[in-house]
Image (cartoon, rainbow, N blue to C red):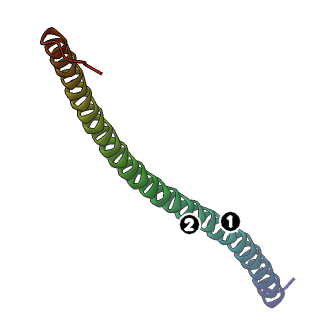
Amino acid sequence: MDAVTLGAVGTIIVGLAAAAAAVYGHRGQQRVNHSGAVMTGYGGLVDQLQEERAELRARIAEKDRDLAAAYAELAAERAEKTALQGQINDLNAEIRELRARLTALGGDPQ
């Protein structure tokens, strides 16, 4: 074989090696791109979950405030009811005392 033939065969071999390396490199790049897309999608899902958590925490805080207000209102109503019951008891005792005095004075207590 002469030098020209060896040069041509060498060029063909180098070309085939370069083509094989390019195909292998392209496949590796596709793998990297796919991994990047998966990570980007995962990151988007994580962001959505964090937003939903923040929204739910805000709703829970609002409901906690509503619950505390309802308990406060209930406590105020119970205190008012207790005060009214005390007034009723005082009035009943006063009525009994007045009827007893009326009876002692000779009147009809009805």
Q: Report the side of 92 relative to 19 (left or right).
A: left
Vertical placement of residue 84 versus 38, above or below: above
Image coordinates of residue 34 in percent, x first then y, are 66, 67
Which of pointers 2 and 1 lies earlier in the amino acid sequence?
1
The reply, left or right, for residue 63 in relation to residue 6 is left
Quarter of the image for the C terminus: give it.
Answer: top left
110 to the left or right of 49:
left
For label 2, the crowd category at 10 Å Cα-Cα, with few meaning under 14, some 14 to 19 and many 20 or more, is few
Instruction: Report which quarter residue 33 is drawn in.
Output: bottom right
Label 1 crowd (10 A; few <14 / some 14-19 / many >=20): few
Tell which residue pokes out farthest to the front in this image: 106
What is the CA distance from the residue labelled 2 to the residue labelled 1?
14 Å
Q: Nearer the viewer, residue 39 or 102?
A: 102
Q: Are marks 2 and 1 in contact (CB under 8 Å)?
A: no
Quarter of the image for residue 97 reads top left
Residue that carries the numbered disc 2 in the rendered image: 40
Q: In the rendered view, would you say 104 is above or below 86?
A: above
Give 106 or 90, whichever is nearer the viewer.
Answer: 106
- Rendered view: 70 above or below 95: below
Q: Residue at x 46, y 60 (%)?
A: 51
The residue lying toward the viewer, choosing from 48 and 2, is: 48
The circle drawn on residue 31 is 1
Residue 71, percent from left and from top: 33, 38
Position in image of residue 15 (x %, y %): 75, 82
Give left or right: position of 17 versus 90: right
Name which residue type carries label 1.
Answer: Arg
The amino acid sitting under disc 2 is: Thr
Quarter holding the N terminus is bottom right
SS of the residue at dot 1? helix
- Residue 76, position in %: x, y? 25, 38
